[in-house]
């Protein structure tokens, strides 16, 4: 899956790869760029949540993923399937606006 261009720009900008979110789920940690594909394979995302592509976690058993519609969802790493996906934002830009800026 091709990740959205605005997500790629965010990664290339050197912006924080982890931190607080303004609302639930309250924390994010973006996976290392070079491991995105591998971690999706290891978590068997395509098998359990076809059309989704994981890119981060919350440090507590939830994965953040781009959905087939380009929106951002939270999926449990155990019991992962599309019907339990919780929509967090309509796009990366919307998700990025939820990141708490300090300083």
Image (spheres, rainbow, N blue to C red):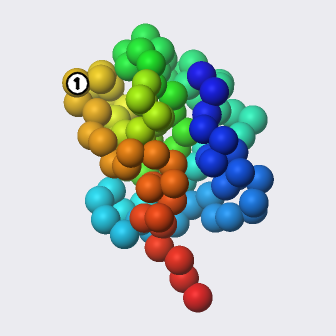
99 in relation to 28, above or below: below
Q: Does the rendering let one see residue 32? A: no
Q: Nearer the viewer, residue 99 or 30?
A: 99
Q: Nearer the viewer, residue 58 or 64?
A: 64
Q: How many neighbours does mark 1 have within 10 angstroms: few (below 14), some (14-19), or many (20 or more)?
A: few
Residue lying at the far bottom in this picture: please name it: 103
4 left or right of 94?
right
Q: Nearer the viewer, residue 97 or 38?
A: 97
Residue lying at the far left in this picture: please name it: 83
At a point 52% along the width and 44% down the height, the residue shown is: 56
36 left or right of 65?
right
- The residue identified by callout 1 is 83
Q: Secondary structure at mark 1?
A: helix
**Residue 71, how many percent across, how many down?**
41, 39
**Residue 38, how many percent across, how many down?**
65, 24
85 in relation to 1, above or below: below
At a point 30% along the width and 42% down the height, the residue shown is: 87
In the picture, the quarter occupied by the N terminus is: top right
């Amino acid at each position: 899956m091709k990740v959205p261009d605005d997500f790629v720009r965010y990664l290339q900008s050197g912006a924080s790869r982890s931190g607080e979110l303004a609302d639930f789920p309250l924390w994010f940690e973006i996976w290392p760029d070079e491991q995105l594909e591998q971690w999706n394979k290891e978590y068997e995302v395509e098998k359990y949540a076809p059309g989704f592509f994981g890119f981060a976690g919350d440090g507590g058993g939830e994965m953040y993923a781009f959905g087939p519609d380009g929106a951002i969802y939270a999926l449990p790493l155990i019991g992962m399937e599309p019907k339990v996906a919780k929509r967090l934002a309509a796009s990366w830009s919307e998700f990025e606006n939820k990141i708490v800026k300090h300083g």
